[in-house]
Image: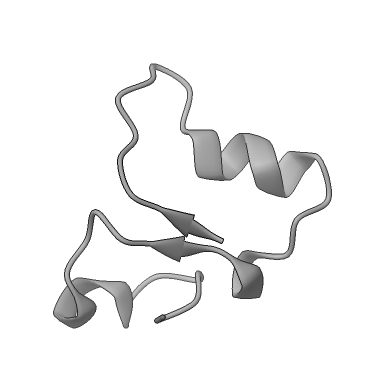
Amino acid sequence: MWVQQDGTAAAIADKLVARGVPKQDLVLAYHGPHVRQYTEFALG
């Protein structure tokens, strides 16, 4: 899953993880690839 934007007070990616979506299945697309490599989420 690609998260293109997150303008919520509670991070949507964290809510998805709390509901059972593995971090490896989530790409934080609002961060560039050079930043994504330092997160626990998928690179894309």
Is residue 10 positioned above or below 27 on the image? Answer: above
Seen at 58% across and 41% down, the residue is: 14
- Residue 21, by quadrant, is bottom right
Is residue 15 positioned above or below 26 on the image? Answer: above
Is residue 13 positioned above or below 30 on the image? Answer: above
* Colour scheme of the rendered structure: one colour
Q: Nearer the viewer, residue 44 or 37?
A: 44
- For the N terminus, the image quarter is bottom right
Seen at 32% across and 83% down, the residue is: 37
Seen at 48% across and 22% down, the residue is: 10
The x and y percentages for residue 36 are 30, 73
Q: Is residue 41 left or right of residue 22?
A: left
Q: Is residue 8 left or right of residue 17?
A: left
- Residue 23, by quadrant, is bottom right
The x and y percentages for residue 44 are 41, 80
The x and y percentages for residue 3 are 42, 51
Seen at 55% across and 63% down, the residue is: 26
